[in-house]
Image (tube, helix red, strand yellow):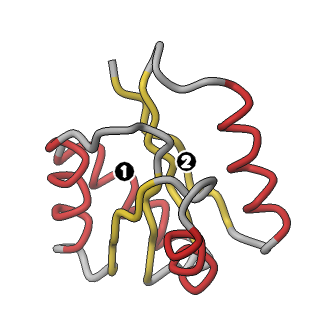
């Protein structure tokens, strides 16, 4: 978890991103995701997990404000169409995608 958080933090700092939003199409948030967000937050980067931007307008608004995203998805749980819609939303609102965390 700390390693993943460190890699995300470095990527954000390289791109001068001081605020990052983590989002996911997963129905249930795993504790490990919140742990990673907490570790990122300790590196002078504001990090928040918002959930599913495809279904939650408030989550999308938080993402639009931050302009930076890391997707969190799970092998076998995330379908291609949902991920494509997330990417299209990011493109539409000029949101920088800093990466994807893929859970087993």
N-terminal label among 1 and 2: 1
Q: Is 26 displayed left or right of 67 in the figure? A: left
- Crowding at mark 1 (Cα within 10 Å: few <14, some 14-19, many 20+): few
Residue drawn 46% across and 21% down? Answer: 77
The x and y percentages for residue 21 are: 45, 68
On-image quarter of the C terminus:
top left
Report, in whole angstroms, how far the alpha carbon at label 1 lies from the one at label 2. Answer: 10 Å
Q: Is 92 displayed left or right of 51 in the figure? A: right
On-image quarter of the N terminus:
top left
- Judging depth in this view, the residue of 5 and 47 nearest the camera is 47
Residue annotated with mark 1: 7
Label 1 or label 2, whichever lies nearer to me, is 2
Q: For the image shown, how many numbered marks are present on the structure?
A: 2
Residue drawn 36% across and 50% down? Answer: 7
Above or below, 1 relative to 38: above
Residue drawn 29% across and 39% down? Answer: 28
Above or below, 75 relative to 7: above
Q: Is 53 displayed left or right of 6 in the figure? A: right
The x and y percentages for residue 76 are: 47, 13
Residue annotated with mark 2: 99
Above or below, 10 relative to 17: above
Disc 2 on helix, strand or loop?
strand
Tag 1 near tag 2, CB within 8 Å: yes
The x and y percentages for residue 101 are: 43, 38
- Crowding at mark 2 (Cα within 10 Å: few <14, some 14-19, many 20+): some
The residue sitting at the top extreme is 76
């Amino acid at each position: 978890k700390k390693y993943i958080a460190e890699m995300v933090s470095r990527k954000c700092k390289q791109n001068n991103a001081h605020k990052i939003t983590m989002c996911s199409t997963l129905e249930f948030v795993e504790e490990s995701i919140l742990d990673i967000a907490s570790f990122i937050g300790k590196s002078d980067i504001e990090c928040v997990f918002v959930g599913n931007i495809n279904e939650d307008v408030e989550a999308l608004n938080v993402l639009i404000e931050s302009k930076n995203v890391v997707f969190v998805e799970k092998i076998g749980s995330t379908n291609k169409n949902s991920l494509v819609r997330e990417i299209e939303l990011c493109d539409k609102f000029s949101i920088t995608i800093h990466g994807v965390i893929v859970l087993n």
